[in-house]
Image (tube, rainbow, N blue to C red):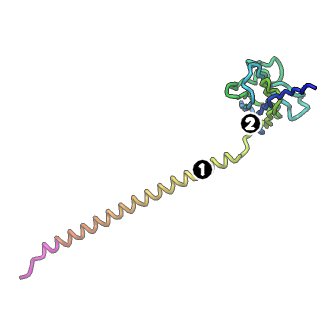
Amino acid sequence: HFPQKTTLWPITALEVYTSKEVDALNGTNLRLKCTFSSSSPISPQLSVTWNFQPEDLNLGPDETVFYYLKEPYKLSAGRFKGRATWDGNIERYDVSIVIWNLQPTDNGTFTCQVKNPPDVDGTIGEVRLRVVQKVHFSEIHFLAIAIGSACILMIIVVTVVIICRHHRKKKQEKTTEVREKEKLKIREEKEATPLED
């Protein structure tokens, strides 16, 4: 019997990271951020595929939004033709895109898939987009209002303290001036009164 040879293949790991949910205003542009990490160095055969699944399945099947292989490829058809542009930087492990002029029909799930041979199996990043007519009052807005209110309150308090000190100083100066005048008057009266022998 000959001993069996076993070959150990390195475990490959490709992780993709995205924002899970995003709200954006109708008619605006949105950067769909997608980054990745890979156990392999960046390959010249690295590919990126962005797909879209509409929230309303009556609006059609899944469709490709964007494709990258050595360079960004423009779509020749579909709802995102001319509206999806590359905004990534492969050297920084960033494969983000921008969707221009968002529309209510863009509600749905965008997926970001990266293949970096030999890392071809890994997580697929998902971003659920909700296009809204108005921006909802969020925690950020609340925080901004709270900080702004606190700043205004501080300015009012400082202003009141300065005004009070100014008035107190004026009053003190007036009181000192009156005392000085009284002392001067008493001195003048004493000088005017003849001394008795």
Label 1: which residue? 147
Query: Earlier along the polypeptide chain: callout 2 or callout 1?
Result: 2
Marker count (numbered): 2
Q: Is residue 73 above or below residue 186?
A: above
Residue in the image at 32% along x and 62% along y: 173
Q: Is residue 77 above or below residue 142?
A: above
Secondary structure under tag 1 reads helix
Q: Residue furthest right?
A: 1
The extreme bottom residue here reads 197
Mark 1 belongs to which amino acid? Answer: Ile
Please name whichever residue, 127 or 108, is drawn nearer the observer in this view of the structure: 127
Mark 2 neighbour density, 10 Å: few (under 14) some (14–19) many (20 or more): many
Q: Residues within 10 Å of mark 1 (few under 14, many from 20)?
A: few
Is residue 13 visible in this depiction of the protein? yes
Question: Residue 161 at x, y = what percent?
Answer: 45, 58
Q: Which residue is mark 2?
A: 24
Instruction: State whether residue 100 appears in this view.
Output: no
- Quarter of the view holding residue 171: bottom left
Name the quadrant of the C terminus. Answer: bottom left
**Residue drawn at x 65%, y 49% as measured from the top left:** 143
- The residue drawn where x is 86% and y is 32% is 54
Q: Is residue 193 magenta?
A: yes
Q: Nearer the viewer, residue 66 or 4?
A: 4
Query: CA gap, disc 2 to disc 1?
Result: 24 Å
Q: Secondary structure at mark 2?
A: strand
Q: Position of residue 140 (x, y in %)?
A: 67, 45
| Residue 92, quarter of the rendered image | top right
Q: Residue at x 17, y 71 (%)?
A: 187
Q: Which residues are magenta?
A: 188-197
Q: Is residue 16 within the magenta segment?
A: no
